[in-house]
Image (tube, grey):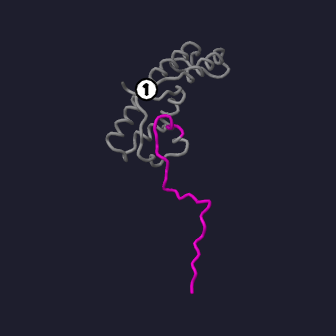
Amino acid sequence: MPKPGPKVKLGQLVQLAGNRQNPGALSKLAGATDYSYKITRKIAKLAKAVSEELEVYNAAQNKLVEKYGTKLEGQKGKGVTPGDEGFEPFMEEYNALLGEEVELDCSIVDLPFGPEGFSAADLLGIEDFVRIPDDESEEKPVADAKPELKVVK
């Protein structure tokens, strides 16, 4: 029986995926070339699971825009903007949508080392989806270390 996947809120997945102007941490992780085939495959499964959940999210978001939106002048479709009659109920339902918890159909990815070029925000964004070992290479000061004295004659 497979282990259950990570449980996260849809809002985390939206942030993880990012957008065209600002790719999220998942895009950066999926583009990493330093990992073995086995790890890369797990990253691909994670990306696929996130993509599938985002398809459901996008459909639900579009239904909300259709329900509460108004016709945009000079454009196809509808939009919801602050000040519109449907803005407040839209935001209420949209925030509830972002707060829904989903379980991804993938396992947590155990990385042998942290991804290169990731910011602190990127690492926070992927912390529910990957395990990265602590960096033990940093020297930690020893509190009760005593200096060694040599007697020279």
Q: Name the residue located 58 percent from the left edge and 20 percent from the top edge.
A: 94
Q: Quadrant of the N terminus?
A: top left
User: Type of residue at label 1?
Assistant: Pro
Residue that extends furthest to the bottom in the rendered view of this protein: 153
Mark 1, residue position: 4
Most common SS among magenta residues: loop
Of residue 67 and residue 10, the one placed in the foreground of this image is 10
Is 79 rendered above or below residue 121?
Answer: above
Q: In the visual, does 70 lie left or right of 56?
A: right
Q: Is residue 43 above or below residue 3?
A: below
Quadrant in the picture for residue 11: top right
* Quadrant in the picture for residue 86: top right
* Crowd band around label 1 with a 10 angstrom C-alpha radius: few (<14), some (14–19), many (20+): few
> For residue 38, what is the image quadrant?
top left
Residue 41 location (% of width, % of height): 34, 36
Q: Where residue 52 sits in the image (x, y, percent)?
A: 42, 24
Task: Compare residues 95 and 38 and report the one nearer the observer.
Answer: 38
Residue at the spot 43% in from the left edge and 47% down from the top edge: 113
Location of residue 17 in the rendering, given as x and y in whole percent from the top left corner = 48, 33
**In this orientation, which residue lies closer to the viewer: 18 or 117?**
117
* In front of the other: 60 or 148: 148
Q: Residue at x 37, y 47 (%)?
A: 34
What range of the chain is rendered magenta? 124-153
Q: Indicate whether 39 appears above or below 2.
A: below
Of the 4 image quadrants, the one containing the C terminus is bottom right
